[in-house]
Image (cartoon, rainbow, N blue to C red):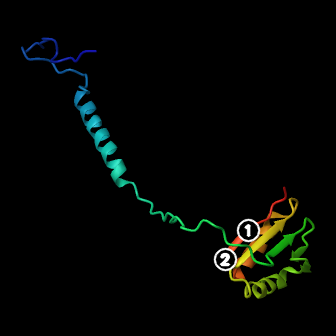
Amino acid sequence: MGMAVGNGGQRNGAGRFAARGEINVTPLIDIVLVLLIVFMVMTPVMLKELLTKIPQEQSDNTPQPPADNPIVVSLAADGTIALGSEVVVLESLGGAVAEKLAHDRQKVVFFRIDDHARYGRAVKLMDLCKGAGATTLGIVTNK
């Protein structure tokens, strides 16, 4: 691949060199490469930084003991809601959970949800308990 310089010595009738109809792309390639290098250098500089907070290592690795009577909200496949062992309606669940959380220092609520229960209903239960003052939500699984 070579570069054509001049017009090969072709002269027109007046003794002057004739104009060529080809475009010299070498300056264009130089400009494109310079722009490529500039963008490659500037892209990492322009990226936004994400600030993260890494948890500090705890000196005591023993987990806190569970409460004497953990708060467990159950949702059956038919939509029945139970707080512990007593059946409650959705409207009174928030008040009942808030009352139990008032005596619990850890503010943890566990959920036992049937596999065939409606997802939206389960999320609504979790939202109600979070609004009632729960700081930690846990899901109980069956083995």
Spatial distance from mark 2 to mark 1, Cα to Cα?
10 Å
The residue lying toward the viewer, choosing from 38 and 128, is 128
How crowded pointer 1 is (Cα within 10 Å; few <14, some 14-19, many 20+) is rated as few
The quarter of the image holding the C terminus is bottom right
Kind of residue at badge 2: Thr
Residue 138, position as x, y percentages in the image: 73, 68
Kind of residue at badge 1: Gly
SS at circle 1? strand
Residue 136 shown left or right of residue 14 in the figure: right
Q: Kindly identify which numbered label has been placed on residue 35.
A: none
**Residue topped by disc 1:** 138
Above/below status of 105 relative to 42:
below
**Residue drawn at point x = 91 percent, y = 80 percent:** 86
SS at circle 2? loop
CB atoms at circles 2 and 1 under 8 Å apart? no
Q: Quadrant of residue 104?
A: bottom right
Above/below status of 123 relative to 68:
above
**Residue topped by disc 2:** 135
Residue 125 shown left or right of residue 29 in the figure: right
Residue 66, position as x, y percentages in the image: 74, 73
Residue 91, position as x, y percentages in the image: 83, 83
How crowded pointer 2 is (Cα within 10 Å; few <14, some 14-19, many 20+) is rated as few
